[in-house]
Amino acid sequence: MTWHVDAEDLRAYAQGELAPPLLWSADTHLTGCAECRGVLASVSEGVDAGWERIDAELDAPQPGLWERALVRVGVADHTARLLAATPVLRRSWLAAVVFVLMATVGVVHTADSPTAFLALAPLLPLAGVALAYGPVLDPTYEMAVVSPVHGFRLLMIRTVAVLVTGLGLNFLATLALPAYGLRALAWLLPALALTATGLALTPRLGQVLAPSLVGGVWVGLLVLARSSGDGSLVQFTAAGQGAAAVVAALAAGLLFLARDRFDVFFSRSAA
């Protein structure tokens, strides 16, 4: 047999686009020509691979504005995806934080004292970091657990993102209190101390209990300081700021020592 089906006709045959009478000739020829059947098989594989690529592109999730912005500034694709999926970076959470801060600033102006703002501001980053990971709120939690990312690294990626956002909002709220000067920034060190302590206790106490306990201790210390009757809160004095810095440093050290426990914590939470 010297005649063979043209390669373009075989490609059209594989795609179901070959029309009669060429279709009938190709059908008849392929039954007796092993060479053309081999060419058809290779053409069909290429067509199938092309359709698979098209299907994969259509099924792939489209990156959002935040994710595209992160990739544009040099963040790796997989890291940008993990950051973009952080629950507390969504508009609903950010709007709630802005509302709380605005209401607190309003109370400060009414009461002519920054105590309410200084007391509340350290709790917002603690709550934000606590809600940044875990099976309850994170829609990508299972994907994050099975991804080739160390649990501690995932935690730090989410923590840095939330802290940058939360502390940035707190700082903007502080600018609305110019009359108090640097005293209005006395929330920063307690915020870092509370967040680091909550993270360090998470592998032992869990995602909910650890930050709840730390936040409760903070509120208890505020109530105790207020009940002393001197009209000032020791947490926002020079001694209190120094103590907060020491606690933050110690908690960061404990967090680093316990970094390997987060893989176990994430696996246990996923189960």
Image (cartoon, rainbow, N blue to C red):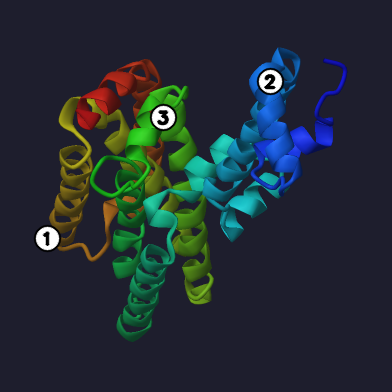
* Residue of label 3: 249
Q: The disc labelled 3 sits on which kind of residue?
A: Ala
Q: Which of 125/82 is in front?
A: 82
**136 shown above or below 66:** above
Mark 2 and mark 3: Cα distance apart in space: 71 Å
Q: Quadrant of the C terminus?
A: top left
Identify the disc placed on residue 4: none
Mark 1 and mark 3: Cα distance apart in space: 28 Å
- Tag 2's secondary structure? helix
Q: Nearer the viewer, mark 1 or mark 2?
A: 2
Q: Which of 178/193 is in front?
A: 193
Label whose residue precedes the other's in the sequence (1 or 3): 1
**237 shown above or below 246:** below
Identify the disc placed on residue 227: 1
Mark 1 and mark 2: Cα distance apart in space: 90 Å
Task: Measuring from the top left, give residue 107's x and y in whole percent.
Answer: 31, 80
- Tag 3's secondary structure? helix
* Residue of label 2: 37
Q: Is residue 186 visible?
A: no
Q: Quadrant of the N terminus?
A: top right
Q: The disc labelled 2 sits on which kind of residue?
A: Arg
Position of 164 with respect to 234 (left or right) is right
Residue found at the very far bottom of the displayed protein? 110
